[in-house]
């Protein structure tokens, strides 16, 4: 098959994927379909759970390895759809349907690229993976197969970025806090009001600035997004609970940041997870330099993806626009997929990188 045929084949795959419901943790049917699609085309997919991957037939332990990854799960459709979210609809150059933009277009574009690169041996090994549970940062997604792969030296994460290079991505950490007081009758001057005690803590989260700033991601951003206290109007509350959404730049690991916060705040804090760390690839990396030669822009992404689960350098890039994700009448433009494959090819064909 020629390059055009691989792209056309992948576009047909995308239409079929849209027609198969694949909410997070419910990806079995679409994973079954993709597995069969790959086998019919002479590839040798491997599978764990609802994750599918293919290793290059030219694989050699003497070469560095590049992972081409995107996700097959979708969020549940929001209200406001005028098309059927789980049936592909084609109008002019647009394919409408849930997951078309986020991230089905990246899945099929990376697959087309993988098949193109398989035509000739490359300086790098390539592994294509279509993985589950990205939308919920689940442990049954890409993180569950990394030990199954050879040591990976570079990851290309397919997400809708208008084919610009996200060279950094904010991490996410959610904290639950509790400030204690002492209950008493509201009509009398007794008790210690936990809400009042919490005001200074909440004010600290609102105004504190960490010293390390990022050229691409800016400051660490902390936002108090929930508060719970009190049970009835005449009782001084003895507990005030709150939660904080923290978006972390690449200069801090989540656990490190948590310890710094604990030193500053005098209340009980619990992190829900430390696993979604910020991602970053050096701007002098050969892949980034090649992207610059192609005229691609570098930027920092505020959203979290499977990059957070990958302990090796990664770049996030893919066809489509993040602004369309999780919205009614989500769509991808066919020409964006074609352009995406061409740019991926320009980035990765003949690429030389160092092994770990």
Image: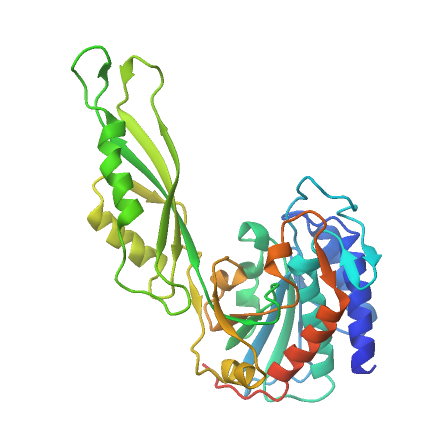
Observer-nearest of 172 and 221: 221
The percent coordinates of residue 345 (x first, y second) are 66, 81
The percent coordinates of residue 59 (x first, y second) are 63, 83
Q: Is residue 36 left or right of residue 266?
A: right
In the picture shown, does residue 355 fall above or below 97? below
Q: Inspect this view and state whether residue 138 appears.
A: no
- Colour setting: rainbow
Observer-nearest of 141 and 307: 307
The quarter of the rendered structure image containing the N terminus is: bottom right
The percent coordinates of residue 140 (x first, y second) are 57, 53
Q: Is residue 167 left or right of residue 218?
A: right
Q: Is residue 163 left or right of residue 272?
A: right
Q: Inspect this view and state whether residue 131 appears.
A: yes
Tell me the quarter of the picture where residue 189 sits.
top left
Residue drawn at x 83%, y 58% as measured from the top left: 91
The quarter of the rendered structure image containing the C terminus is: bottom left
The percent coordinates of residue 354 (x first, y second) are 48, 86
In the picture shown, does residue 40 fall above or below 131? below
**Residue farthest along the top direction in this orientation:** 187
Observer-nearest of 69 and 241: 241
Number of callouts: 0
């Amino acid at each position: 098959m020629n390059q055009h045929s691989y792209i056309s084949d992948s576009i047909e795959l995308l239409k079929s994927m849209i027609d198969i419901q694949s909410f997070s943790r419910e990806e079995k049917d679409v994973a079954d379909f993709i597995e069969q699609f790959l086998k019919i085309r002479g590839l040798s997919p491997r599978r764990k759970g609802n994750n599918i991957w293919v290793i290059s037939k030219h694989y050699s332990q003497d070469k560095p390895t590049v992972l081409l990854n995107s996700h097959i799960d979708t969020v549940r459709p929001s209200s406001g759809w005028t098309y059927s979210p789980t049936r592909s609809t084609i109008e002019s150059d647009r394919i409408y349907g849930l997951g078309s933009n986020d991230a089905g277009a990246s899945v099929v574009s990376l697959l087309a690229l993988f098949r193109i690169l398989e035509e000739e041996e490359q300086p790098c090994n390539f592994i294509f993976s279509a993985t589950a549970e990205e939308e919920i940062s689940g442990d049954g997604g890409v993180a569950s197969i990394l030990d199954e792969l050879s040591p990976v030296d570079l990851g290309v994460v397919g997400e809708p970025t208008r084919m610009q290079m996200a060279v950094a991505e904010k991490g996410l950490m959610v904290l639950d806090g509790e400030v204690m007081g002492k209950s008493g009758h509201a009509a009398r001057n007794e008790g210690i009001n936990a809400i009042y005690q919490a005001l200074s803590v909440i004010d600290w989260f609102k105004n504190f600035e960490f010293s390390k700033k990022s050229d691409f991601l800016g400051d660490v951003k902390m936002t108090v997004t929930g508060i719970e206290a009190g049970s009835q109007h005449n009782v001084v509350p003895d507990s005030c609970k709150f939660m904080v959404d923290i978006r972390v730049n690449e200069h801090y690991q989540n656990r490190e940041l948590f310890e710094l916060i604990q030193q500053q705040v005098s209340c009980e804090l619990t992190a829900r997870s430390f696993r979604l760390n910020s991602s970053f690839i050096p701007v002098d990396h050969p892949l980034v330099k090649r992207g610059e030669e192609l005229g691609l822009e570098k930027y920092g992404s505020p959203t979290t993806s499977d990059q957070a689960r990958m302990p090796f350098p990664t770049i996030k890039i893919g066809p489509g626009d993040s602004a369309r994700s999780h919205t009614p009448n989500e769509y991808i433009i066919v020409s964006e997929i074609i352009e995406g494959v061409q740019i991926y090819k320009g980035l990765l064909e003949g690429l030389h990188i160092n092994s770990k």
